[in-house]
Image (spheres, grey):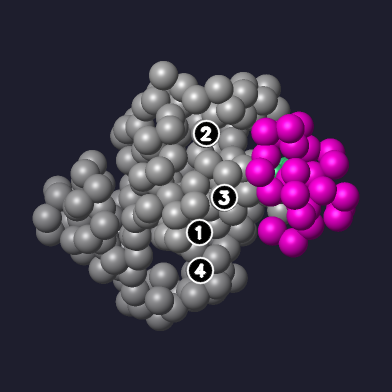
Amino acid sequence: MLNTNVEAIIKILSGLYPDAKTGLEYENSFQLLIAVILSAQCTDLQVNRITGKLFKKYRLPEDYARLSVDTLANEIKSCGLFYSKSKNIINTCRILVEKYGSCVPSTREELEKLPGVGPKSAGVLLGIAFNQHTLPVDTHVFRVSHRLGLSKAKTPERTEKELIALLPPQYRMDFHHQLLSHGRQVCTARKPRCTDCQLLKHCAAGNSSFTGES
Ligand code: SF4
């Protein structure tokens, strides 16, 4: 059964962001995997600019597996950490070809072993590409959930566990997208707009130090 405060927060966020979903553009689970690897420390908009050209040129894991690190790095150089991302994408694609018949694996354990795929990225892939009830915790989800008083955990992994304990499976992935949208649009890192925030009544931090700052 849902805690009353969590239920109220879900209701408000669902009203504010009814269609919240990933900003990454992709056509299949493989393209989503590449986009997710590229998205570390890079905006969705910038990733989409890169993949818009990249996905036309290279379509299959085999195409990337054959590239040199320098060649791919040059294609993605407008993205932060492009050289290490280039290495990770090529090595990930080699594993897909050699071990998974050029498909993206669908378990957390397998995904987290791919270069460039950490727990958050694995959660995003499982939730979006494989419709599993995950609740990936990125920097926005971590910040907003802590400010709302939904978690006190010190790490994203522990936070994910605490949030999962609060939310029934069917709410989790939407909640991830909604907290992320709220973190980008209202509950920003430096200047949360508490006085404009519809969650203020339900927010631990908003009712203490942040109120009136924005
Ligand atoms: S009230 Fe303030 S701290 Fe709380 S969620 Fe809204 S913007 Fe964030």
Q: Which of the two marks, 2 or 4, is nearer to us in this view?
A: 2
The crowd level at tag 3 (other Cα within 10 Å; few <14, some 14-19, many 20+) is: some
| Amino acid type assigned to the residue bearing label 4 in the image | Ile
Which is nearer the N-term, disc 2 or disc 4?
A: 4
100 vs 5, nearest the viewer: 5
Task: List the single residue furthest toward the front.
Answer: 208
* Residue at the disc numbered 1: 39
CA separation in Å, label 3 and label 4? 34 Å
How many numbered callouts?
Answer: 4
Which is nearer the N-term, disc 1 or disc 4?
A: 1
Residue 175 - label: 2
Say what secondary structure mark 4 lies in.
loop
Left or right? Give the position of 75 relative to 102. right
Say what secondary structure mark 3 lies in.
helix
Q: Which of the two marks, 3 or 2, is nearer to us in this view?
A: 3
| Amino acid type assigned to the residue bearing label 3 in the image | His
The x, y position of residue 206, in whole percent, is 74, 45
Residue found 38% across the figure and 53% down from its top: 158
Give the magenta range.
Answer: 189-214
* Residue at the disc numbered 3: 146
* Residue at the disc numbered 4: 76
CA separation in Å, label 1 and label 3? 23 Å
Residue found 49% across the figure and 47% down from its top: 151
Do the numbered discs 1 and 4 sit on residues whose CB atoms are within 8 Å? Answer: no
The x, y position of residue 80, in whole percent, is 55, 72
Say what secondary structure mark 2 lies in.
helix
CA separation in Å, label 1 and label 4? 11 Å
Q: Which of the two marks, 1 or 4, is nearer to us in this view?
A: 1
Which is nearer the N-term, disc 2 or disc 1?
A: 1
